[in-house]
Image (spheres, rainbow, N blue to C red):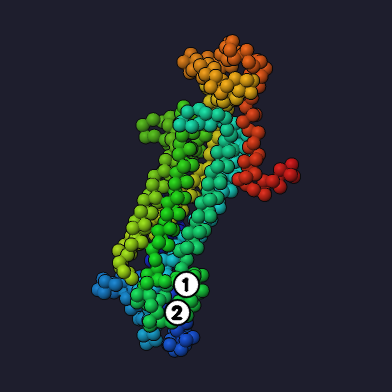
Amino acid sequence: MIPRYSRPEMAQIWAPESRFQIWLEIEAHACDAQAALGVIPKEAAAAVWEKGKFEIDRIDEIERETRHDVIAFLTSVAEHVGEPARFIHQGMTSSDVLDTCLAVQLTRAADLLIQDVEGLLVVLRRRAEEHKFTVCVGRSHGIHAEPTTFGLKMAQAYAEFDRCKTRLETARAEIATCAISGAVGTFANIDPAVEAHVARALGLEVEPVSTQVIPRDRHAAFFSALALVASCVERLATEIRHLQRTEVLEAEEYFAKGQKGSSAMPHKRNPVLSENLTGLARMVRGYAVPALENVALWHERDISHSSVERMIGPDATGTLDFALARLTGLMDKLVVHPDRMQENLDQMRGLVHSQRVLLALTQKGASREAAYVMVQRNAMKVWEERIDFLDTLLADTEVVALISEAELREAFDLSYHTKHVPTIFKRVFGATEQMRNAAQ
């Protein structure tokens, strides 16, 4: 997690101060439960809340000697709590603290990521409605296909990120489990009621079988969900990169006053934000692989997962948080060029209507195969001779023998391609869109 690609609120979740504070709360809640069960004195539990403190420098100092982070933490806390500290961590093992803390951190990180997606959805919906009927050329294989609208591009992105929100919510629910089950997860030295109390206090669910560690398939699912969200970020960023190419230039990133695009070429306005998002998405996806490899731990536990999670926890969530915020800003200020979209539609001199002509000919009695041959031979002339598609069709005696000039011209009507845009918008935006249309 480097400052360039992290935001303060997410970074705070992973800061040492936050981590140790969660550890302290886990231990204090466990003491409350132990006191309620009569295992430790109530005064001892109260002392942990009243006197429990720690110093990060002191923890680091102790860990250099003990080479055990949880023991170093407990020693630091004990220096503040005094004699009642002997009741802290009763029947618990390090993983109880570490895994439960990680669950708290990941759920908090997920909450921020869900908020990020919600903010992005607001912007995408606004841009979709703004350009609902802004016609542009659709492309398949990077080649002009048929007309679509820029609003539909935005609606597609909205639907995709709406699914991302659901995935993040599912991932949050799956990761939000607590394990206070002791060595090898048998509860031999601690009552399951302690785990239940700590889970309630921290807003978590109890882990059904923790085997000393929370099963890492949960974490693998979490980071896989993040990787999928990152891929959706990249998909939209890649669309913007292509649309900003000089030869296309249908949309472009906002270029601020005083901004510079190149150290060598003063004219440049590059898609730097969307290119950056593409790179960040690669990193987030990369974190999913070690999370998947963490699933296969030895027997009841080992710590091969630990070093991985110390890195991918803050890095994956922090990077995705930054990427979602950057994408939201990019789409909010995205400059759209409808005139250029029309120019590009006209660039192939009407070829985008070839299927409409094909279908019209079949309606007039031509077989599909014969109609395809007629349309394609005229389309190839447009490609090769740079002439108008409608003119070539009108000059084709076989074509005009089947269909009138008026009917051919009608096949070139752009509105034909947008007639079902409202239907798609209703599917994407649901009841709210239906109510808006009714009011209009």
Instruction: Locate residue 380, reporting x and y percent.
Output: 49, 17
At 46% from the left and 68% from the top, the residue drawn is: 177
User: Which residue appears farthest toward the right when viewing the image?
Assistant: 439
Residues at marks 1 and 2 touching, judged by CB atoms closer than 8 Å: yes
Measured Cα–Cα span from mark 1 to mark 2: 9 Å
At mark 1, the secondary structure is: strand
Residue tagged by mark 2? Answer: 192
Q: Dot 1, crowdedness within 10 Å: few (<14), some or many (≥20)?
A: many
Q: Is residue 212 left or right of residue 166?
A: left
Which labelled disc corresponds to residue 206? 1
Q: Visible in this render: residue 104?
A: no
What's the amino acid at mark 1? Val
Quadrant that contains the N terminus: bottom left
Residue, far left = 65
Residue at the (60%, 20%) spot, across then down: 366
Query: Which residue is depicted at the point 65% across and 33% down?
Result: 419
Residue occupying image coordinates x 60% and y 45%: 428
What's under tag 2, amino acid-wise?
Pro
